[in-house]
Amino acid sequence: MERDRQSALGETHLIGLGAIGHSSLWALARQSGLSGRLHVVDHEAIELSNLQRYVLAGQAEVGLSKAALATHALRSTPLEVEAHPMKWAEYVARRGDWVFDRVGVALDTAADRLAVQGALPRWIANAWTQEQDLGISRHGFDDGQACLCCMYMPTGKSKDEHQLVAEELGMPEAHEEVKTLLQTNTGVPNEFVARVATAMAVPFEPLAAFVGQPLRSFYQQVICGGLVFQLSDGSRLVRTVVPMAFQSALAGIMLAADLVKHSAGFPMSPTTSTRVNLLRRLGSHLHDPKAKDSSGRCICSDEDFIAAYRLKYGCAVEQLSNGSA
């Protein structure tokens, strides 16, 4: 009986199959006898620049859908894996049923995390990495504690993504064009890449290989990946943060562990967040309490969202230690 309880994952969603998501899949594949239905959601494909941190991918997987790779990685387990190679919003719209009992979040941006919480899953485990640390946070919604949105509430005035990307590409005046390219996910045209090369004062030929790729992928490889820095011999400085390989791997393992514990009904940490600082000796206290947003701006303080959550899951308050699905 105890073994069955430990092995039943129920219906779980894993959103985001980057370095953290890959590590979660790696850990789940090694959990003996794990059963249930796992939905994996990610619209991207494996790229060459991913291999340094992706524990399941090698040269042969470049170009393969991340969602498809997840089904391959778990093919020898009793888990029933459903791959959804699309963005979260598209998946939710197609699914029709907005009941999500347990969701693991391994996404890159705050905006994407806010979108997941907006769909009102019953319970969320969220894994993340930062420059010096990594961690896992756990969220109900109607429980008086911090929801996922509370962790990523915007403060102050900040520039939109399209404005920041346009500036990084050296073409701040093209922010509306950049906005359209980001929204439509269309490939960058030859003329656009040529303008970037001119703005960055680098040769066009090395950038030509990226013509036709979505702008976000182009930006990640050319700017974040350091290509412009290399082509300019370091004269064009760009700042990028790339987690260390083991950093993302550990965050993913922590995420998988929390999903399994929650599904089995084992006691969860009473603290919303657990944080590990990679630049310090492992401390005796790793919990990082996070309070519910007190401004009243978060959706977990909105009566309409609360009513929708209760309508989906009943009026009982969802506690972090509750493993019901």
Image (spheres, helix red, strand yellow):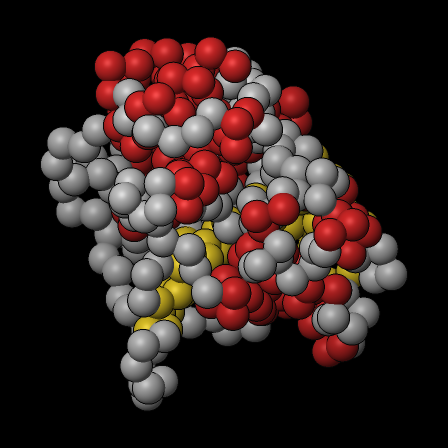
Task: Look at the picture and state if 16 lies above or below 78.
Answer: above
Q: Position of residue 183 (x, y in %)?
A: 45, 18
Quadrant location of the N terminus? Answer: bottom right
Q: Judge left or right: residue 311 versus residue 238.
A: right
Question: Where 325 falls versus 118 (above or below)?
Answer: below
Residue closest to the eye, 278 or 284: 278
Residue in view at x 64 percent, y 50 percent: 12
Quarter of the image for residue 139 reads: bottom left
Relative depth, front residue between 260 and 131 = 131
143 is higher (above) or lower (below) than 250:
above
- Above-or-below relation of 32 to 185: below
Q: Residue at x 72, y 56 (%)?
A: 58
| x and y percentages locating residue 172 in the rendered image | 24, 21
Residue drawn at point x = 46 percent, y = 65 percent: 244
Give the quadrant of residue 238. top left
- Residue 57 visible, this angle: yes
Q: Is residue 314 visible?
A: no
